[in-house]
Image (cartoon, grey):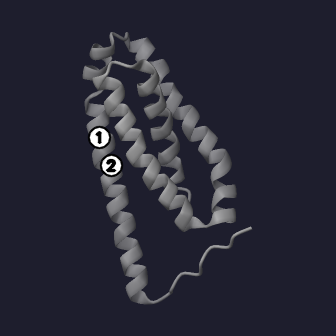
Amino acid sequence: MRQARPADGSPAHLAQARWLLVGLFGLQGLTSASWLARLPAVRNALGLSPSELGVVLLVGAVGALVTVATAGLVVSRFGGRAAMTVGAAGFAAAFVLLGLGSALRSLPLLAAGVFLNGSRSRSARSR
């Protein structure tokens, strides 16, 4: 089992970590707001009814549930830094898939992006 590297507890290091975390959450908020504002256009582009879109969005909740069930194990085994790194990479991949799914009118790509979006939102907050 790999142990997490001990963090430098200096005030400068803690301030840097705090500002990086604030930046990550701010970026997540902006991109999530952008995605939610585009939902009606995505629904129309894919020809989905409101209830069908609801089922697609439910995939994100399933992704969040899967991650909530495993996040504690991941953080305890690999450390918070690794969990944040994976969460940030998942964050980028999720929005690429969301964009491709809507642009290519591909429901499977969109659903994969929604699942990853739900799971990355939990993994980035698991620390």
Q: Position of residue 29 (x, y in %)?
A: 32, 49
Residue 15 location, x and y as percent? Answer: 37, 80
Quadrant containing the N terminus in the rendered view: bottom right
Q: Which mark is residue 118?
A: none
How many residues crowd mark 1 within 10 Å: few (<14), some (14–19), many (20+)?
Answer: few
Rendered view: 33 above or below 51: below
Taking 5 as reference, is 95 left or right? Answer: left
Residue occupying the point 44% across, 52% down: 89
Q: Nearer the viewer, residue 10 or 96?
A: 96
Measure the alpha-carbon separation of dots 2 and 1. Answer: 6 Å
Q: x, y (%) of residue 54?
A: 45, 20
Q: What is the quadrant of residue 32 in the picture?
A: top left
Q: Which residue is mark 2?
A: 29
Residue at image coords 49%, 19%:
55
Picture disc at residue 33: 1
Within 10 Å of disc 2 (Cα), the crowding (few <14, some 14-19, many 20+) is few
Callout 1, which amino acid?
Ala
Please state which amino acid type lies under the numbered disc 2.
Answer: Gly
Q: Quadrant of the C terminus?
A: bottom right
Element on which disc 2 rests:
helix
**At numbered mark 1, what does the secondary structure look like: helix, strand or loop?**
helix
* 32, above or below 60, in the image: below
User: Please, which residue is most extreme toward the bottom here?
Assistant: 10
Specify whether 3 is left or right of 44: right
Say which residue appears at 36% left-offset and 40% top-offset: 95
- Across and down, in percent, residue 126 comes to 56, 57
Q: Is residue 25 above or below residue 45?
A: below
Q: Are marks 2 and 1 in contact (CB under 8 Å)?
A: yes
Nearest the camera: 109 or 13?
109
| Residue found at x 50% / y 60% | 84
Asked if residue 123 is positioned above or below residue 41 in the image, the reply reads: below
Numbered-mark total: 2
